[in-house]
Image (cartoon, grey):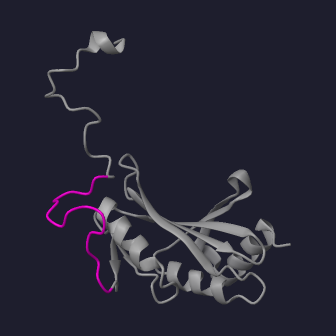
Amino acid sequence: MLTNQEVAEDLVKKYGADVFDFEDPFDLLTLSTTREQIVPMLGYLKAHASFQITFLTDITGVHYPDSPGQEFCVVYHAHSWVHNFRVRIKVFLAEADLHIPTAIPVHACANWMERETFDFFGIIFDGHPKLIRILNMEDMDYHPMRKQYPLEDGTRQDKVDALFGR
């Protein structure tokens, strides 16, 4: 049976200081790495003879507007069917430099996931063959999952605070 400890120790031995912030919430191995190491790491986990973490489950983004220099996070979830083992890998990016290499050379399924992450967060996947919006209209000039917009429309006249217990 594959353990979080075994995979974490192997990644530290292979990548050294380029892997950090290890956690295991709900027994899910979670770690962070750099944008330069994410694609090689995904390839390493996929090709590893005993880990066999071959399935890229998801790629998404998270916006942390109150974290200077780490405003955006690209999150990768990968899975080993053989061991029923999951790993979450995070890469933090500064708002001023939202570029990260595409994972398509390692996992072809990354294509649509990267397009969705670009569409909703504006993260640019360098080397992607067709990085265009996938769910929203092409002429949108914003990325809707960024926490840059008010939660309520201040111009609405039909919302009286008293009706909502405020």
Task: Check residue 156 for magenta coloring.
Answer: no
Q: Which stretch is magenta?
A: 129-144
In this rendering, position of residue 160 left or right of residue 85: left
Give the residue displayed 25% in from the left and 37% down from the top.
150
**Left or right of 67 on screen, residue 135:** left
Query: Residue 141 lies in magenta, yes or no?
Result: yes
Q: Residue, x 20% and y 63% (percent of image)?
A: 137
Does residue 155 show up?
Answer: yes
Closer to the camera, 91 or 106? 106
Residue 80 picture location, percent across and down: 70, 75
The residue nearer to you, when weighing 80 against 89, is: 80
Residue drawn at the location 16% of the way across and 26% of the way down: 156
Quadrant of the image occupied by residue 123: bottom left
Q: Quadrant of the N terminus?
A: bottom right
Query: In the rendered image of this protein, does residue 65 appear above or below residue 57?
Result: above
The rendered magenta stretch, by its main secondary structure, is classed as loop
Residue lying at 74% horizontally and 56% vertically, measured from the top left:
27
User: Could you say which quadrant of the image residue 83 lies in?
Assistant: bottom right
Residue 148, image x and y in percent? 27, 46
